[in-house]
Image (cartoon, rainbow, N blue to C red):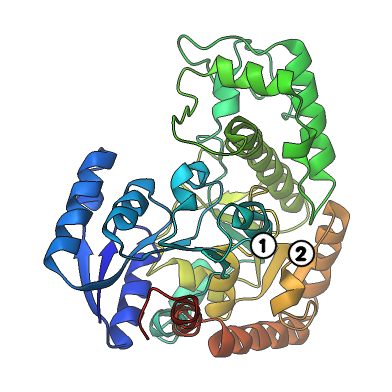
């Protein structure tokens, strides 16, 4: 069986490609978008169409959804299979999502519940996974020097989202938002952007403060007024304006790409500052960490060679899921467990579907609970290590890419259009 893998350099692609090949598939790769980030939909469609015309492809695959590929496959009657690994994904609002040759897999149940009615039978739920074998190659070779270098009481690996916060960039005033730490200035305004009114600022501040207190339920999108949506959308000349969309794209983008990113920045800064008052906290990020005076900032780490050492050597690995991932488990959760690390994460409603809390990982639902659990597990080493081992064993047995892609192939053969 031959397939085309359309690549754009997602971190998940090499693992998925390797597993497809281990299944006996002949995998052709189209890598134009890895080297040219300005590829147009027309160019994308032309490349994919050329492959389809030349090869007897069982299906075309990509990580995340490309409308141009979907339309091409629909026209040429070849199944288009994609696995969404990010959130938010504006492209899912394209009318291409309704094409009959789509086989779209979403990792967040809330996202699945929202989009699946648009194309029943062609949109499926599939959680993310990890490559335990690859992590083992790094972790099993760790030295005492590695444990000394990467060890910490609490570690966090990830962006602070300050550099990705478009909402901050829209603020015409130099005055900080109420939800910001005192003394921290807002990002400079975008040239040509319209002002954000005091009313909208206050509304967004209040919404962020309310959401910060609630875990396992995201109510930002449903709480937005039409006035706030219009104002934020109009303030940014670069606001995404799709001409081929279905659903309330503006509400989704304002909630997730603007307020959601701001929420992530506020949450991560506050959480790390709070923990650093009580514990030794190491941060691995390429973001500006100047607002975290007590955190031990160590710069970025290589995802494949250094990150697993951090997860293995740290006593507690902290995960803070971005709120646009409403119910699902982010890739970071699977990777920490797959490296044999102890995981303490914010509660997500899908966690009990896969793990036993307190036995295979730990969760928190408030800042007070977070501090209490960090204190507890730093002083209960044997229990902490047992939880890490059980979490690793669960992931290694049930949640690898081999397991997940076998589930995908089974769904594809059962849903038709793809031969077994």
Evaluate whether residue 39 shows in this view. no
Query: Which residue is at the front of the view, 299 or 410?
Result: 410
Inspect this view and state whether residue 103 appears.
Answer: yes
Q: Residue at x 47, y 81 (%)?
A: 144
Looking at the image, which residue is at 60% across and 30% down? 250
Q: In the shown orientation, is residue 138 left or right of residue 388? A: left
Which residue bears the numbered disc 2? Answer: 349
**Residue 205 image offset from top left, x and y in percent:** 77, 27
Q: List x then y, in percent, for residue 253.
A: 58, 35
Q: Position of residue 221 (x, y in %)?
A: 72, 38
Mark pair 2, 1: CA separation? 9 Å
Query: Which label belongs to residue 109?
Result: 1
Above or below — where is 76 with respect to 257?
A: below
Q: Earlier in the sequence, mark 2 or mark 1?
A: 1
Instruction: Locate the N terminus and report the quarter of the image it occupies.
Output: bottom left
Query: Percent x, y for residue 234?
Result: 57, 16
Q: Is residue 112 above or below residue 285?
A: below
Dot 1: within a 10 Å radius of its alpha carbon, few (fewer than 14), some, or many (20 or more) residues? many
Q: Element under label 2?
A: loop
Q: Is residue 185 above or below residue 261?
A: above
Q: Is residue 349 above or below residue 404?
A: above
């Amino acid at each position: 069986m031959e397939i085309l893998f359309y690549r754009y350099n997602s971190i998940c692609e090499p693992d998925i490609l390797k597993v497809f090949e281990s299944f006996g598939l002949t995998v052709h790769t189209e890598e134009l978008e890895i080297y040219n980030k300005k590829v147009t939909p027309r160019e994308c469609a032309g490349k994919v169409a050329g492959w389809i015309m030349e090869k007897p492809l069982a299906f075309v695959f990509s990580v995340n959804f490309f409308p141009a590929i979907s339309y091409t496959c629909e026209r040429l009657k070849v199944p288009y299979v994609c696995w969404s690994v990010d959130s938010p994904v504006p492209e899912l609002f394209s009318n291409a999502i309704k094409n009959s040759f789509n086989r779209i897999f979403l990792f967040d149940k809330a996202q699945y519940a929202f989009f699946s009615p648009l194309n029943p039978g062609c949109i499926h739920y599939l959680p993310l996974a990890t490559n335990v074998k690859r992590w083992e190659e790094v972790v099993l070779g760790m030295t005492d020097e590695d444990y000394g270098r990467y060890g910490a009481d609490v570690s966090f690996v990830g962006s602070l989202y300050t550099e990705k916060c478009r909402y901050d960039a829209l603020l015409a005033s130099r005055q900080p938002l109420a939800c910001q730490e005192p003394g921290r200035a807002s990002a400079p305004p975008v040239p040509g952007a319209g002002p954000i009114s005091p009313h909208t600022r206050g509304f967004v501040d209040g919404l962020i403060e309310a959401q910060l207190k609630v875990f396992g339920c995201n109510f930002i999108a449903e709480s937005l007024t039409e006035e706030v949506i219009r104002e934020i959308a109009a303030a940014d000349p670069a606001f995404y304006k799709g001409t081929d969309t279905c659903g309330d794209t503006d509400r989704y983008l304002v909630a997730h790409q603007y307020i959601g990113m701001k929420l992530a920045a506020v949450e991560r800064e506050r959480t790390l500052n709070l923990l650093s008052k009580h514990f030794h906290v190491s941060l691995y990020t390429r973001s500006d960490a100047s607002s975290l005076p007590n955190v031990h900032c160590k710069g970025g780490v290589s995802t494949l060679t250094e990150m697993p050492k951090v997860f293995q050597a740290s006593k507690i690995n902290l995960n803070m899921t971005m709120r646009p991932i409403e119910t699902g488990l982010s890739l970071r959760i699977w990777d920490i467990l797959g490296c044999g690390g102890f995981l303490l994460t914010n509660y997500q409603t899908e966690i009990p579907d896969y793990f036993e809390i307190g036995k295979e990982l730990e969760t928190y639902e408030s800042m007070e609970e977070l501090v209490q659990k960090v204190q507890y597990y730093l002083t209960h080493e044997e229990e902490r290590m047992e939880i890490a081992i059980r979490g690793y064993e669960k992931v290694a047995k049930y949640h690898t890419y081999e397991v997940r892609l076998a589930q995908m192939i089974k769904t594809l053969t059962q849903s038709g259009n793809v031969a077994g």
